[in-house]
Image (cartoon, grey):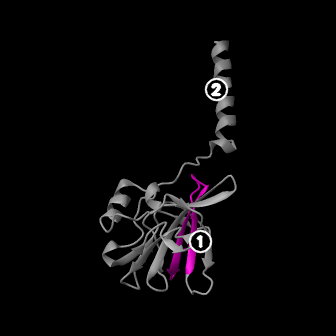
């Protein structure tokens, strides 16, 4: 019987000390599961990785909509880390961090009539606000590893349904796998 108590104590100690450490944080990519816009209101897109100028490629998917009142929906769960007013444009960037995958940051750029505040919990499908200036919005997925931040094509970290809905509109959403933001 004494043997079983020792084994039980050992397992308890190992479980407590290995599950609460920094290594226990899940840094795997979060999965985008909810489409951020209504595709029936979509006019055109700027693909992820499309050349903006000679030195820069688009670090986001940009949706250009037909409706200036179109809602922007959260693609994944998390919390609002920051609301940032865009310089020179009177719309916002919403930065959402996922507690389970804290290395990943979802950015919703060009949002008006923002419905959330810093610190608010976010659930997939939740309305974050309205499409921004120019009837456009962008989604960006960033990860910082070893001091370097990269943007990744959102479709590479999305549910099959998310990808199908996008590919029903056009097939070439991502011209690159990752770019420097």
Select label 1 or label 2 by which is in front.
Answer: 1
Q: Is residue 84 magenta?
A: no
For label 1, count other residues whose C-alpha is less than 10 Å away and answer few (under 14), some (14-19) or many (20+): few
Compare residues 69 and 121 and report the one nearer the observer. 69
SS class of the residue under badge 2? helix
Q: Residues within 10 Å of mark 2 (few under 14, many from 20)?
A: few
Q: Which residue is identified by label 1?
A: 55
The spot of residue 147 in percent (x, y) is 70, 56
Quarter of the figure with residue 150: bottom right
Q: Main secondary structure of the magenta part?
A: strand
Q: Quadrant of the C terminus?
A: bottom right
Q: Which residue is mark 2?
A: 11
Q: Quadrant of the N terminus?
A: top right
Q: Identify the image quadrant of residue 2.
A: top right
Tell me: residue 126, above or below residue 10: below
| Magenta highlight range | 92-116
100 falls in the magenta region: yes
Horizontal side of residue 71 vs 101, given as left or right:
left
């Amino acid at each position: 019987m004494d043997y079983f108590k020792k084994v039980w104590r050992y397992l308890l100690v190992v479980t407590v000390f290995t599950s609460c450490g920094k290594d226990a944080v899940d840094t795997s990519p979060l999965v985008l599961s909810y489409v951020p816009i209504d595709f029936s209101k979509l006019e055109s897109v700027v693909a992820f990785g499309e050349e903006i100028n000679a030195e820069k490629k688009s670090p986001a998917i940009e949706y250009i909509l037909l409706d200036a009142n179109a809602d922007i929906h959260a693609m994944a769960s998390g919390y609002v880390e920051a609301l940032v007013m865009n310089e020179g444009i009177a719309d916002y960037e919403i930065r959402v961090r996922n507690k389970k995958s804290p290395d990943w940051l979802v950015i919703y750029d060009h949002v008006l009539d923002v419905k959330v505040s810093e610190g608010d919990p976010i659930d997939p499908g939740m309305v974050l606000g309205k499409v921004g200036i120019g009837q456009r919005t962008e989604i960006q997925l960033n990860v910082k590893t070893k001091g370097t931040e990269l943007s990744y094509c959102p479709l590479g970290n999305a549910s099959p349904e998310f990808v199908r809905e996008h590919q029903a509109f056009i097939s070439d959403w991502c011209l690159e796998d990752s770019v420097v933001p």
